[in-house]
Image: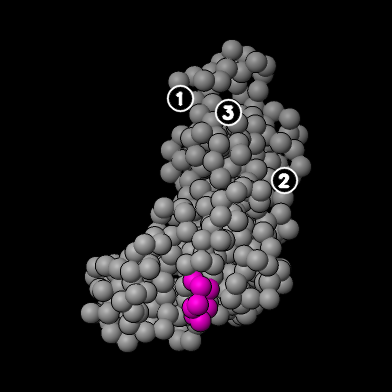
Amino acid sequence: MSSARLTIDLDAVAANWQRLSRLSQAETGATVKADAYGLGAGPVVKKLAGAGARTFFVALAEEGAAIRQALGAGPRIFVFSGHMAGDAPSLRNLDLIPLLNSAEQLTRHAESLAGHPFGIQLDTGMNRLGMEPAEWAAVRAVGLPGAPQLVMSHLACADEPQHLMNPGQLGAFLEMTEGMTAPRSLAATGGMLLGPDYHFDLCRPGIGLYGGAPFEQAQPVATLSLPVVQVRDVEPHEAVGYSCTWVAPRPSRIATVAAGYADGLLRTLSGKAILWAGEIPCPVVGRVSMDLITVDVTELDSDPVSLDILGPRQDVDDLAELAGTIGYEILTSLGNRYRRRYVGAPS
């Protein structure tokens, strides 16, 4: 039995980065944390570097290893989690730049990696990572151990353009960085779409690179085809799948495809998702199980070899809406059992 096939269009990733980059006069970097949102950090960053990206962002120092190996020396790699205990060897050996989130991290960095580049992350109201105004004021009063490579914050509601948090956080960021000469960054994908007031010196798009909302002009990046293991006839009133949640209302042809929640296809898609045979929709029936999904293919003229769950007729945000989640979770949940194929990979 062949495995499910995940096709990643690297040309689309590069085109999305270039389109976003044209929105701003600032430098445009790229957020490639979580293995480039589940699509493969190595191929993705090579393609982005070829398109012109020179600054990259990861969540953890450990993630920086794959990025540095793919890029070699030169491009900057920032670490959102900052300088955590035990990070010094990775930060030093891989030439990673921690975005320090607290006075404690600042002290740790100064003591263990004196002279090594760093950035600063500020909390402008999201209450997640970064120094709050009082802590930041105290740190500035004592003095930084050098010039930061970047001072950044993160918008909580950038995907809602009218949300009052956006101008509120912008104002807080301006106030907290007043008088600084270091480069500043506030905007990820959603922030870039809010306009130039949010762009500052560096933008760091993430989900928009991979075809997700709120970047409506994004080209789709991922196609996921699931192989059909078996097709069977089901008579009226016969049940399909665990707990007998679907009962055939008519004579039906049911295809069982090789993928399930172990592969990132969430159980909440049970009875909701649509798979596609070309332009013909085929509804999921019964429950999504660990390794298998059952699909009604009665309307097809012949038994399919495979069915698409991501493709031209259904993108990551369409699937996420059916699952009651967001495109980020769909992408980053895509499992390791998929046979990955890259289109447009750098030579």
Q: Residue at x 56, y 20 (%)?
A: 246
Q: Is residue 295 above or below residue 166?
A: above
Nearest the eye: 305 or 344: 344
Where the C terminus falls, by quadrant? bottom right
Q: Residue drawn at (48%, 35%), measured in percent from left and top? A: 267
Mark 1 Cα-neighbour bin, 10 Å: few <14, some 14–19, many ≥20: few
Q: Is residue 118 visible?
A: yes
Q: Earlier in the sequence, mark 3 or mark 1?
A: 1
Label for residue 242? 1
Q: Which residue is mark 3?
A: 271
Where residue 17 sits, quadrant-wise, is: bottom right
Q: Looking at the image, which residue is at 49% across and 71% down?
A: 177
Q: Position of residue 328 (x, y in %)?
A: 54, 51
Quick one: label 3 or label 2, which is nearer the N terminus?
A: 3
Above-or-below relation of 255 to 236:
below
**What label does residue 40 carry, if any?**
none
Mark 3: which secondary structure? loop
Give the side of residue 237 with respect to residue 140, left or right: right
What amino acid type is highlighted by mark number 2? Arg
Q: Position of residue 215 (x, y in %)?
A: 67, 56
User: In screen coordinates, is 133 left or right of 230?
Assistant: left
Instruction: Say few, some or many: other residues with alpha carbon within 10 Å of mark 2 (under 14 / 14 to 19 / 20 or more).
Output: some
Residue labelled with disc 2: 313
**The residue under label 3 is which amino acid type?**
Gly
Query: Under tag 1, what secondary structure?
Result: helix
Residue range corresponding to the magenta coloring: 177-184
